[in-house]
Image (tube, helix red, strand yellow):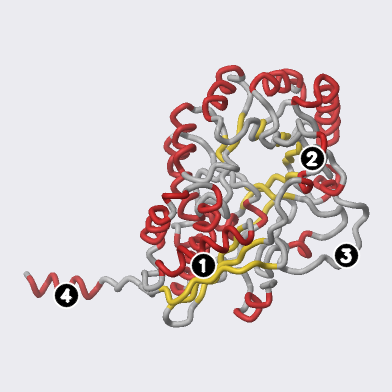
Amino acid sequence: MRRAQENNRTLVPAPVTMKIRSIHAFPIRSDLVGGPATTPARRPAWTEHAEVASPMAHFPRFKRQRASWRPRWPSVACLVTAEDGSWGLGMTRYGSPVIGIINEHLAPLLVGEDGTDTEHVWSLMQGMTSPYAGGLSCYAISAIDLALWDLKGKLLGQPVYALLGAPAREHIDCYATGNDTDWILELGFQATKVACPFGPADGMRGLDANQAFIEATRQLIGAERDLMVDCWMAFDVDYAVSFARRMQASRLRWMEDCLMPDDLDGVRLLRERLPAQGLAGGEHWYTPAPFASAAVARSLDVFQPDIGWASGLTGCLKIARIAQAAGIPVMLHAGMNTAYGQHFTLAVPNATMGEYFLGSAPGVPLEELRLTPGTAVPQDGTVTPSSAPGFGLGLTLDAVHALAVS
């Protein structure tokens, strides 16, 4: 019997393991690491001039543009190198604070761990950052976790979506977010989300202007396409209710991120007061815990974590399982702009649609705006990620090093 058991064990392939030799985070030029576009634009992008509602709308000095008060830290790349020289790359945001968390705290402690055991390393990072857990720590965890999944896919010679099981779909249906609606339609997207221009600080005038803007967008896209609106944490409960009632004729599929992210009681109250209006959120939730709370309360109809912020692929998989048990779809924030989000969405059954944020100028082909050379871009409203090993980023190690800025 013992010999038979030993023989049986020899038939099972040994799992691939590879210890981490180094982890290094560094600033990179911009989110568009593929380089500047070369095709001339027809006109400036909507992001250069549009007024957008925000949590700072009550402060006139900072109202019009998000760029007037958001930090100008560079984006972050994280390179994980295994003991055999194999490597994986993850990316996130918020510059020097996140880089410090990775290089000064997490990296030295994770050297020597099995880089293919993503679940174990993720749990280690959650514990290590627990004294200061929050947004920035989760950005750091995300970068390392994505790099480890990229490494694991390369070591196994498989795209990351294959490591998650059989693909749940042949391609990903996308919606585009942006206020250049005519350009979005020209690109073939069958659904769109607009950024809401005004919030409570603008009073009745702003509410009237919002209604006119939403109604004009509905007329432009027609009755057959889905229309959503991003409220970007600018509303309070009463304003959100008034807004929803004014927009009924425009048939919004959902209103997104109406309230400040830590107002979980407000999210539940909003659901009670708007039982028939689709509500989405979670872009600024960084751990599975608030999603679990929202799933129990059924306070949101769509969960929208960001794979580069919400503790990486491992974190988003946990969120997706919570959502699936509650019958809630997961649509990653700007997930179709990155290979990371594309691989997740192709593989996860309840990731039913993907968001492509279109902040670039009309007339510039999407191929010139890809995050990395291997990142797929939507064609006629659908996208299929690369089947290359890992996330298929299409970068050599020299190209990765060339991204760094001082």
Of marks 4 and 2, which one's residue comes earlier in the chain?
A: 4
Q: Disc 1 and disc 3: Cα gap in Å?
A: 38 Å
Of marks 3 and 2, which one's residue comes earlier in the chain?
A: 3
Of marks 1 and 4, which one's residue comes earlier in the chain?
A: 4
According to the picture, the residue beneath numbered tag 3 turns out to be 39
Tag 4: Cα neighbours inside 10 Å, few (<14), some, or many (≥20)? few
According to the picture, the residue beneath numbered tag 1 turns out to be 103
Horizontal placement of 29 versus 202: left or right? left
The residue positioned 51% from the left and 75% from the top of the image is 87
Q: Disc 3 and disc 2: Cα gap in Å?
A: 32 Å
The residue positioned 76% from the left and 44% from the top of the image is 66
* Residue type, mark 3 in image: Thr
Horizontal placement of 175 versus 9: left or right? right
Q: Is residue 54 above or below residue 313?
A: above
* Residue type, mark 4 in image: Asn
Of marks 4 and 3, which one's residue comes earlier in the chain?
A: 4
According to the picture, the residue beneath numbered tag 4 turns out to be 7
Residue 23, given in percent of the width and then of the height, sits at 49, 71
**Disc assigned to residue 62:** 2
Q: Disc 1 and disc 4: Cα gap in Å?
A: 45 Å
Displayed quadrant of residue 376:
bottom right
* Residue 69 at least partly seen: yes
